[in-house]
Image (tube, helix red, strand yellow):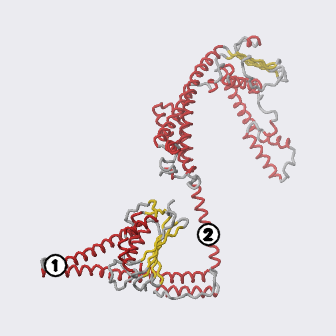
C-alpha cells in the first residue's frame, strides 16, 4: 500500500496535470484581477461594504474637498490677500525661507561678510546683517517675493478649479482675522446652516463644533476651534446618485470576480503544494533528480523569478489596453516560466544544494581558493630563504636530477638540512625508486610475455605435431591398414587435447576481460561441494587420493553465480587430480565468518614447487616445469578471474610441497 501511494505521489502524469493546473489558475487569477481593475473604479472595499455612504471611497473624496477648502480658508483666503503678500511667512527677515534662492543668497552674503571683515563668526547682530543684506539686494528681494506670490496665486486658482469641477457640491467658508478682516468663499446663494442640513449628506464646522450626516465616517480636518471659522459642505443627489450607482455596479462585479478568484487561488495552492512536495522525485527510486535547467545558478533563478513577477505585474496594470488576445498568451508564458523556476529552486532545497548552486557561492569559493593559495605560498617562500646548507642541498638536488634524467635510477641525492630542500631531495629519491621498480616490473612483464608465447607455442605445437604425424602415416598406409584404428584413436585424443586447450584459452580471455555474464544469487556452498564431490566420485576413486571433507552443520549461504563458482571448484579439483601426489590426502574446509565465507583446498604436490605464488597464477604457467602433463596452465588463472567476477577473492599459498587454494565470497544478505 505504501509503495502504491509513493508511486501515485511521484507519478509523472499527475505532476504534469498539477503543473498545467497551476499555470491555468495563475493565469485566470491575473486575468480576473486585470478585468476588475479595468472595469471597476471603486476600491475592493465595495465587495464587502454595501452602503456607499459608509465607504472609504466617499471618505477620501470628502477629505480631499475639506482639505482644499481648509487651505483656502486658513492660508489663501482671497486673491487680494495673496497679492498683498498675506501668504508670505511672518518672519521674513529670519532666513527668507519662502524662497530657497533668496535664502542661499543671504547665506553667501553672510559668509562673505565675515570672511572679508576677518571677524569671528556670529559676533555681529543678525538684524544688522539683515539690514545690510536688504539694502544691497533690495531688487532681488522684491523679485523673489513677486515670484513666490505668483506661485501662491497659481495654487489658489488650481484649488478653485478643483472645487468647481465637483458636480453636486455646495460649500461655504468664512473666517475673521485678528485685524477684524472678514473673508468668505462659497458657490451658493446663502451661508445659512439650515440650507446645508437640508442636503442628503452634509458636513458642518463652526462654533458648535463638528456635525455630520449620521451615516458618514469621521472626516479628517485641520480647522482650529475658533468661533469665527466656519465651513459648511453639502452633497446633492447629483453628486451622490452616479457614485452610488457606480458603487453598486462595481460591487456586483467584484463579488463575482472574488468568487472565481477564490476558486483559482484554492486550485493554485493545492497544485503548488503537490508539486512542491513531489517535484524532482521519480516513480522508480523516489530520489531527487536535477534537469539541465536546474543546474543554473540559484541566485540567477531567483533574479529571473523577480523579473518575471515584475513583468507580470506590469502587464496586469498596463497591458490590458492592448487586448486580452495579447495579455492572456503572455501571462501564460510568464506564469509557466515563473512556476518552473520556483519548482527548480524547491528541487535544490530538497537536494540540499540551495547554497552550493549559487553564483555568489562560486565567486566566494574562487576568492577563498585564491587567498588560500596565496597564504599557502607564503610559508614556502619563507622556508626557501637561502642559507649555506640550503644552497648546498639545492646544488645536490640539481646534480641528482641530471643523473636520474640520464637513467641512473640508483643514484641517491644527499642533503644536509631537514627543511624544504631536504624533503624535496627525499621525494626525488623516492621517485627514482618508484621509477626503478616500474622498470623492473616492465622487464619482468616482458619476460613473462616471452615465456607465455613460448609456453603457448609449446602446448599447441605438441598435439598439433602429433596430429600432423599421424595424418601423414594414414596417408602412407591408408585407412585400411592394421594400425589405422590406433592412428585414429591418437588423432582423436590429440584433437580433443587441442580443443580443450583452445576452449580454456577462450574462457580465460573472457573471464579476465569481464565479458562473461554473471548472475549473482543465493548459493548454499555446503550442498554445492557435497553434490560436486558425489558427481566426481569415479575420478576420486580412480585417482587414489583420499578426500577429507567434513561440511559444517549449519547452512552457509554466499552471494555468487552457482555455475561459475562450480567452474572455479572444478578447475581446482582438476589441478588436484593432475598434480597431487598419488595416495596422498586432499583436505577441503569451509570457514564461516561474519561477512564472508571461504572454501579452502589443500593437497601435496607430486612435483617440487620451486616457484612463486604470483608466477604460478600467470597464464600457461605450471608447477610441472617439464610440461609433460596434460594441463593447459590456465586453470588457476581462470579460477582467479571467475572469482573476481563474483566480487570475491582468490589466492594461493605454497609451503614446501603443500599447495593451498582459498576462495572467499561475501555472505548473502
Seen from the viewer's position, the closer of residues 421 and 605 is 605
* Residue under the image location 48 percent in, 88 percent down: 408
The answer to which quarter of the image holds residue 578 is bottom left
Left or right side of 75 for 401: left
Measured Cα–Cα span from mark 1 to mark 2: 89 Å
Q: Residues within 10 Å of mark 2 (few under 14, many from 20)?
A: few
The answer to which quarter of the image holds residue 270 is top right
Left or right side of 484 for 108: right
Q: Residues within 10 Å of mark 1 (few under 14, many from 20)?
A: some
* Residue under the image location 82 percent in, 35 percent down: 91
Seen from the viewer's position, the closer of residues 371 and 163 is 371
Which circle's residue, 1 or 2, is located before the other in the chain? 2
Residue 427 percent across, percent down from the top left = 56, 81
Residue 16 percent across, percent down from the top left = 47, 41
Q: Which mark is residue 374?
A: 2
Q: Which residue is mark 1?
A: 484
Left or right side of 641 for 465: left
Residue 171 percent across, percent down from the top left = 72, 17
Amino acid at each position: 500500500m505504501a509503495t502504491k501511494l509513493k508511486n501515485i505521489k511521484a507519478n509523472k502524469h499527475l505532476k504534469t496535470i498539477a503543473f498545467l493546473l497551476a499555470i491555468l489558475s495563475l493565469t485566470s487569477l491575473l486575468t480576473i484581477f486585470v478585468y476588475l481593475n479595468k472595469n471597476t473604479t471603486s476600491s475592493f472595499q465595495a465587495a464587502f461594504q454595501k452602503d456607499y455612504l459608509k465607504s472609504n471611497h466617499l471618505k477620501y473624496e470628502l477629505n480631499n474637498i475639506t482639505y482644499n477648502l481648509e487651505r483656502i480658508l486658513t492660508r489663501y483666503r482671497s486673491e487680494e490677500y495673496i497679492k498683498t503678500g498675506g501668504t508670505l511667512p511672518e518672519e521674513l527677515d529670519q532666513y527668507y525661507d519662502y524662497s530657497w534662492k533668496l535664502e542661499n543668497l543671504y547665506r553667501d552674503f553672510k559668509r562673505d561678510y565675515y570672511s572679508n571683515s576677518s571677524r569671528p563668526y556670529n559676533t555681529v547682530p543678525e538684524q544688522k546683517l539683515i539690514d545690510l543684506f536688504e539694502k544691497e539686494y533690495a531688487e532681488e528681494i522684491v523679485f523673489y517675493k513677486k515670484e513666490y506670490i505668483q506661485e501662491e496665486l497659481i495654487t489658489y486658482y488650481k484649488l478653485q478649479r478643483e472645487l468647481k469641477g465637483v458636480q453636486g457640491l455646495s460649500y461655504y467658508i468664512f473666517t475673521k482675522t485678528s485685524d477684524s478682516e472678514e473673508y468668505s468663499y462659497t458657490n451658493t446663494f446663502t451661508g445659512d446652516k439650515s440650507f446645508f442640513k437640508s442636503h442628503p449628506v452634509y458636513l458642518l464646522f463652526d462654533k458648535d463644533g463638528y456635525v455630520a450626516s449620521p451615516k458618514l465616517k469621521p472626516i479628517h480636518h485641520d480647522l482650529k476651534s475658533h468661533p469665527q471659522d466656519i465651513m459648511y459642505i453639502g452633497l446633492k443627489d447629483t453628486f451622490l446618485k452616479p457614485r452610488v450607482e457606480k458603487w453598486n455596479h462595481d460591487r456586483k462585479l467584484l463579488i463575482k470576480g472574488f468568487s472565481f478568484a477564490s476558486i483559482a487561488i484554492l486550485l493554485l495552492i493545492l497544485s503548488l503544494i503537490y508539486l512542491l512536495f513531489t517535484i524532482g522525485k521519480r516513480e522508480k527510486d523516489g530520489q531527487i533528480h536535477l534537469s539541465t535547467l536546474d543546474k543554473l545558478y540559484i541566485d540567477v533563478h531567483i533574479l529571473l523569478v523577480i523579473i518575471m513577477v515584475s513583468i507580470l505585474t506590469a502587464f496586469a496594470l498596463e497591458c490590458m489596453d492592448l487586448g486580452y488576445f495579447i495579455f492572456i498568451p503572455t501571462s501564460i508564458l510568464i506564469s509557466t516560466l515563473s512556476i518552473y523556476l520556483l519548482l527548480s529552486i524547491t528541487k535544490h532545497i530538497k537536494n540540499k544544494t540551495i547554497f552550493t548552486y549559487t553564483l555568489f557561492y562560486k565567486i566566494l569559493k574562487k576568492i577563498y581558493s585564491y587567498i588560500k593559495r596565496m597564504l599557502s605560498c607564503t610559508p614556502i617562500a619563507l622556508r626557501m630563504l637561502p642559507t649555506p646548507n640550503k644552497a648546498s642541498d639545492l646544488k645536490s638536488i640539481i646534480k641528482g636530477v641530471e643523473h636520474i634524467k640520464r637513467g641512473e635510477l640508483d643514484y641517491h641525492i644527499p642533503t644536509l638540512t631537514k627543511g624544504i630542500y631536504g624533503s624535496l631531495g627525499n621525494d626525488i629519491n623516492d621517485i627514482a625508486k618508484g621509477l626503478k621498480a616500474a622498470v623492473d616490473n616492465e622487464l619482468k612483464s616482458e619476460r613473462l610475455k616471452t615465456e607465455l608465447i613460448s609456453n603457448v607455442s609449446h602446448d599447441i605445437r605438441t598435439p598439433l605435431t602429433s596430429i600432423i604425424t599421424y595424418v601423414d602415416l594414414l596417408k602412407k598406409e591408408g585407412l585400411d591398414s592394421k594400425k589405422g584404428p590406433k592412428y585414429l584413436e591418437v588423432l582423436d585424443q590429440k584433437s580433443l587435447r587441442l580443443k580443450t586447450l583452445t576452449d580454456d584459452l577462450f574462457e580465460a580471455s573472457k573471464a579476465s576481460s569481464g565479458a562473461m555474464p554473471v548472475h549473482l544469487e543465493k548459493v548454499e556452498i555446503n550442498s554445492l561441494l557435497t553434490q560436486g564431490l558425489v558427481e566426481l566420485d569415479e575420478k576420486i576413486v580412480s585417482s587414489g587420493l583420499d578426500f577429507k571433507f567434513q561440511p559444517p552443520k549449519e547452512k552457509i549461504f554466499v552471494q555468487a553465480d552457482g555455475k561459475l563458482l562450480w567452474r572455479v571448484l572444478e578447475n581446482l579439483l582438476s589441478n588436484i587430480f593432475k598434480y597431487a601426489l598419488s595416495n596422498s590426502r586432499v583436505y577441503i574446509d569451509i570457514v564461516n565468518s561474519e561477512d564472508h565465507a571461504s572454501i579452502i583446498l589443500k593437497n601435496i604436490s607430486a612435483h617440487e614447487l620451486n616457484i612463486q605464488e604470483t608466477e604460478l597464477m600467470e597464464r600457461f604457467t605450471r608447477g610441472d616445469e617439464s610440461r609433460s602433463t596434460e594441463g593447459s596452465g590456465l586453470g588457476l588463472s581462470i579460477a582467479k578471474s571467475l572469482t573476481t567476477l563474483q566480487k570475491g577473492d582468490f589466492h594461493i599459498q605454497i609451503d614446501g610441497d603443500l599447495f593451498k587454494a582459498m576462495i572467499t565470497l561475501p555472505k548473502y544478505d
